[in-house]
Image (cartoon, rainbow, N blue to C red):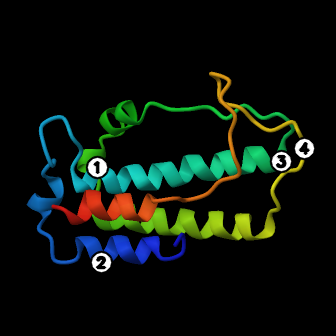
Amino acid sequence: MLRETPEALRQLIAGRSAEALARPEAPGKWSARQVLQHLADSELVGGFRFRMVLAHDRPAVPGYDQDRWAERLRYQDNDPATSIADFTALRRMNLVLLERATPPTSPAWPSTPNGARNRWPTCSGCTRDTTWCIGGR
């Protein structure tokens, strides 16, 4: 599933107008254009987190405010094709990293700043949810 996501994203936006990609599904919701940039940035953050977990003992795994990123990083101005290209490159890098990695066995498993315990990364439903979010436009 992780390998197929970039192509699935390309197929989801194929033939959609710039106006359709820029239109939020409802007031206060993101547009497909914003979701695509969010996916690229989430892949960047995820890659950083994977590296922290694999390279450090008891790493802090910081969170981020996705709505603040969307606003301040001007997701609405990003080109959807560029966002997908960025996502694709980052995903490729992260898959190579994860293919070489083994799950940590140390009890020194990372936690988020609020103390929640993290699990070895999986991708349950991300493609399904992305398809619903973008494909429904």
Tell me the tag on residue 11.
2
Residue 137 location (% of width, % of height): 15, 61
30 shown above or below 37: above
Q: Quadrant of residue 21?
A: bottom left
Compared across the picture, whether 37 is left or right of 123 comes to left
Label placed on residue 55: 3
Tag 1: residue type? Gln
Choose mark 3 or mark 4, whichever is in front: 4
Q: Amino acid at mark 3?
A: Ala
73 to 48, vertically: above or below: above
The residue at the point 64 percent across, 63 percent down is 94
Upstream in sequence: badge 3 or badge 4: 3
Residue that mark 1 sits on: 34
Q: Is the residue 97 above or below the residue 107 in the image?
A: below
Distance (Cα) linking label 3 and label 4: 12 Å
On the image, the x and y values in percent for residue 40 come to 45, 55
Real-space Cα separation, disc 2 to disc 4, in angstroms: 41 Å
The residue located at (36%, 64%) in the rendering is 82
Q: Which circle, 1 or 2, is nearer the viewer?
A: 2
- Judged left or right of residue 72, residue 118 is right
User: Disc 1 or 3, which lies upstream in sequence?
Assistant: 1
Residue 66 falls in image quadrant: top left
SS at badge 4: loop
Q: Which mark is residue 65?
A: none
Q: CA distance from mark 4 to mark 1?
A: 38 Å
Q: Which one is in front in this view, the residue at disc 2 or the one at disc 4?
A: 4
> Callout 2 environment at 10 Å: few (<14), some (14 to 19), or many (20+)?
few
Alpha-carbon span between mark 1 and mark 3: 31 Å
- Which disc number belongs to residue 106? 4
